[in-house]
């Protein structure tokens, strides 16, 4: 694997060279482990590598002290190591342990930087990220008795960097009045829908024209409709909304004109980003069955390379010439959408090892079915519960001394899977009790009631 993206700064302190060499070695070991799909990953497979990385962090901190200079190769390779370790923690279901949050902070920082660059974003974007950072804070706090202070200090610094940008974005969107906030949200949604339509294999002309008509309705409302009658206080932030509306109208016009046609110089980059976006979209739909969190590392690094290859925020061709506006915004949409998919996949990781995911997913599906049956009025006969009983029994029979085993191993997430199994049994009992009461009453057929007594 090549070094992580960004310009590589030479080492100023030769004492860091042994650390860099060791980190290269550890990164190679982590990558080999990531690529091994022949068996399920266990904590003992990567924890020795984690301990070795932490040791290098401690040595690095002793050399650098409190000074923080521009990141060099050591920092970049160290980042790779922690990214991989974080994804390994997620892969084995240890999602509530401090090292697991490192990958999330990296993706959140990318997303926040792109929101700053885009200048247009919704309150819902910030709300989701804010909740995730709150959850990360709690996980890091719980890890203070279990993990190295060097690691915790690193994680806290990353969270603080994310919160600083998030606060900046909150301050900007707070300038918008409550009356204009729904209009702003609608325009953001339309802009993203138009951008998504622009990257489809078959260009949806009618759909884009419908969005264009919705934009004209908003424009009319701002000029002559209800929005034009707002007071000065209620119109706070109107310039932001008007600028966003102009951008949406221009985007719709350009997209209808170009219909997904990208200039030749950027065709390969476009195809690459579309492929990454499509792969991540597929993973987001099938994540319960197909996702290995460590696979996200490769996608993240490919996106980072494309992102950091931009010059002054612009995509440039082989000759250093920037792409025109339509191509710039199309490529940026694909880049940002892909980062958003990675963020969504990371925060939706389950507290179960991949070894137990098949059982966990079956129980999740079974629980969903039982809840739907209960909400629809229950069952009229115990016989209707037989299929669910058989499935639960087959899963129950997989346990050995109360544990789900994979060979001789006891995968992480036993408590979560057992709790879900118990919940399914409780739902079954809730559904069975009323039918048992009915079946205990003597049945009287209408035919018997008409038979005369002898």
Image (cartoon, rainbow, N blue to C red):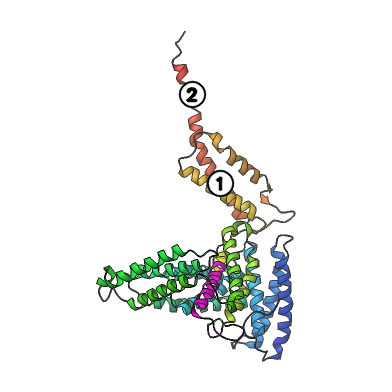
Task: Indicate left or right for 277 with 380 as reference.
Answer: right
Quarter of the image for residue 275 reads bottom right
Q: Which residue is mark 1?
A: 424
The reply to whether dot 2 and dot 1 touch (C-beta < 8 Å) is no
- Residue at (46%, 72%) from the top-left corner? 257
Residue 141 in view (yes/no): no
Task: Indicate left or right for 215 with 361 as reference.
Answer: left
Gap in angstroms between the C-alphas marked 2 and 1: 31 Å
Residue 78, position in %: x, y? Answer: 66, 79
**Against 13, is 78 above or below?**
above
**Against 6, is 255 above or below?**
above
- Residue at (74%, 53%) from the top-left corner? 407
Residue 89, position in %: x, y? Answer: 64, 66
Q: Within 10 angstroms of label 1, few (less than 14), some, or many (20 or more) residues?
A: many
Q: Quadrant of the N terminus?
A: bottom right
Q: Which residue is mark 2?
A: 443
Residue 202, position in %: x, y? Answer: 53, 63
| Segment tinted magenta in the rendering | 317-342
């Amino acid at each position: 694997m090549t070094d992580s993206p960004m310009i590589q700064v030479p080492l100023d302190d030769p004492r860091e060279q042994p650390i860099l060499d060791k980190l290269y070695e550890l990164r190679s070991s982590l990558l080999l482990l990531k690529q091994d799909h022949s068996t399920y990953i266990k904590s003992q497979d990567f924890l020795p590598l984690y301990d070795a990385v932490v040791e290098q962090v401690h040595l690095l901190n002793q050399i650098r002290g409190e000074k923080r200079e521009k990141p060099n190769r050591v920092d970049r390779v160290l980042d790779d190591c922690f990214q991989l370790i974080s994804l390994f923690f997620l892969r084995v279901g240890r999602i509530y342990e401090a090292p697991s949050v490192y990958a999330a902070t990296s993706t959140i920082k990318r997303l926040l930087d792109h929101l700053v660059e885009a200048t247009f974003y919704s309150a819902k974007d910030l709300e989701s990220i804010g909740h995730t950072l709150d959850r990360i804070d709690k996980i890091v706090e719980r890890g203070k008795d279990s993990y190295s202070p060097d690691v915790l200090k690193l994680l806290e610094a990353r969270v603080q960097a994310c919160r600083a940008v998030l606060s900046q974005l909150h301050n900007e969107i707070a300038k918008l009045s409550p009356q204009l906030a729904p209009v702003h949200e609608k325009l953001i949604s339309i802009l993203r829908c138009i951008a998504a339509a622009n990257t489809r294999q078959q260009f949806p002309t009618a759909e884009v024209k419908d969005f264009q008509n919705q934009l004209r309705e908003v424009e009319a409302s701002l000029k002559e409709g209800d929005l034009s009658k707002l007071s000065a206080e209620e119109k706070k932030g109107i310039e932001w909304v008007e600028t966003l509306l102009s951008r949406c109208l221009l985007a719709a016009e350009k997209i209808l004109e170009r219909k997904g046609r990208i200039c030749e110089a950027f065709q390969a980059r476009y195809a690459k980003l579309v492929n990454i976006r499509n792969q991540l979209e597929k993973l987001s739909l099938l994540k319960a069955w197909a996702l290995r969190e460590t696979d996200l590392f490769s996608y993240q690094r490919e996106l980072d390379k494309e992102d950091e290859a931009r010059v002054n925020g612009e995509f440039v061709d082989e000759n250093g010439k920037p792409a025109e506006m339509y191509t710039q915004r199309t490529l940026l949409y694909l880049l940002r959408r892909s980062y958003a998919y990675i963020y969504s996949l990371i925060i939706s990781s389950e507290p179960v090892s991949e070894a137990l995911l098949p059982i966990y997913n079956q129980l999740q599906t079974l629980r969903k079915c039982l809840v739907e049956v209960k909400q629809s009025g229950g069952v009229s006969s115990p016989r209707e519960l037989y299929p669910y009983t058989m499935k639960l029994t087959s899963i129950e029979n997989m346990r050995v001394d109360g544990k789900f085993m994979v060979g001789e191993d006891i995968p992480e997430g036993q408590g979560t899977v057992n709790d879900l199994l118990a919940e399914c049994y409780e739902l079954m009992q809730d559904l069975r009790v009323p039918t048992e009461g009915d079946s205990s009453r003597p049945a009287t057929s209408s035919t018997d009631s008409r038979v005369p007594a002898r």
